[in-house]
Image (cartoon, grey):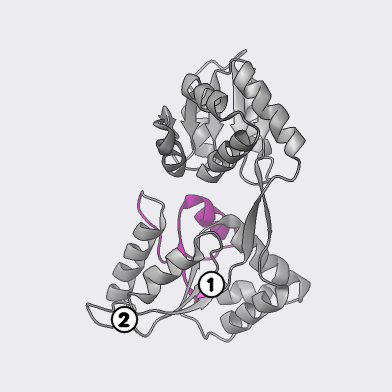
Amino acid sequence: MTDELPLAGWRVAVPESRQLDVLNDMLVVRGASTLRCPLVSIHDCPDEAAIKAWLTLFCSTPFDDLIILTGEGIRRLTGFAERFGMLNDWIAALGRVRKIARGPKPASALRPHKLKPDVLAAAPTTDGVIETLMPEDLTGRRIAVQLYGEEPNEKLQSYLKGKGADISIVAPYVYASDVESSQVSRLLDQLIAAELDVLVLTSVVQVKRILTVAKSEQREAEVITALKNIHIAAIGPIVAQRLDELNIPIDVIPEDKFFMKPLVRKLVEFVALNPK
């Protein structure tokens, strides 16, 4: 390890998919030896008719609020709107509605359209969104909810309905397996054999894929033990919450900006304080 190459000698597993090259390059330029293993890929919702119907409703019917759970969701909906010839109506509707963002990433998706969130959740989690809305009377409010993948988020839906809101949900993208399970299996082999120093996790679905493959191979307990023994770098509180449920400790997590650059900076700080 040197000042120029602060991660030299560290072996880092990178399961990111959408921005794999970006994250991998940030680590390699700092001296890390990386194992690239993209676990999941993101695709547009295959039910285009359902998305078009939702966009038509959103653009033609006044909504009071839009709860944005991910920046990816806004980007996907914008892509659909453009293909359907509804882009101007979509951007105009976004401008009219109060935009409640779960975390900081929706802001970057809104910025190209000269828009920004009106409300940022108290914490970038479902509980944070609920906490933010608690003081408000939601009776009769029309609230659109953009989901995280296909996860229905029953907790948020139940809360909004219980407060008397009229909700409309949309799931503009889906997750799919990226690499073959055999490649994930090799990652598990290396985790169990303690051949890696750090596992960088940027989404809950990565954790799910690791555990799904481990369970299918009847070595879930071994993998969870391995995850408890490796240094985990988590991009934010949603990933951290899932790992906490599994009693898996986290060594590296950004303090407030839950993006890749702050994550890598935190990893460099951790390595400096914990040399091999």
Helix, strand or loop status at disc 2: loop
Helix, strand or loop status at disc 1: helix
Kindly identify the residue that appears in the image at 68 percent across and 37 percent down.
154
Q: Please give the range of residues in magenta.
A: 229-256
Q: What amino acid type should be assigned to the residue bearing mark 1? A: Lys
Kindly identify the residue that appears in the image at 53 percent across and 64 percent down.
16
- Do we see residue 272 in this rendering? yes
| The quadrant where residue 171 appears | top right
**Residue 109 position within the rendered picture, expressed as x and y whole percent measured from the top left:** 46, 41
Q: Please identify, in this view, whether the residue under mark 2 or under mark 1 is nearer the observer.
A: 2
The image's mark for residue 275 is: 2
From the image, which quarter does the C terminus lie in?
Answer: bottom left
| The quadrant where residue 226 appears | bottom right
Residue 134 left/right relative to 218? left
Q: Up-down: is 50 above or below 183?
A: above
**Residue 124 position within the rendered picture, expressed as x and y whole percent measured from the top left:** 47, 42
Lower sequence index among marks 2 and 1: 1
Q: What amino acid type should be assigned to the residue bearing mark 2? A: Pro
Residue lying furthest top: 140
Q: Is 251 contained in the magenta span?
A: yes
The image's mark for residue 228 is: 1
Q: Residues within 10 Å of mark 2 (few under 14, many from 20)?
A: few
Kindly identify the residue that appears in the image at 56 percent across and 30 percent down.
87
Q: Residues within 10 Å of mark 1 (few under 14, many from 20)?
A: some
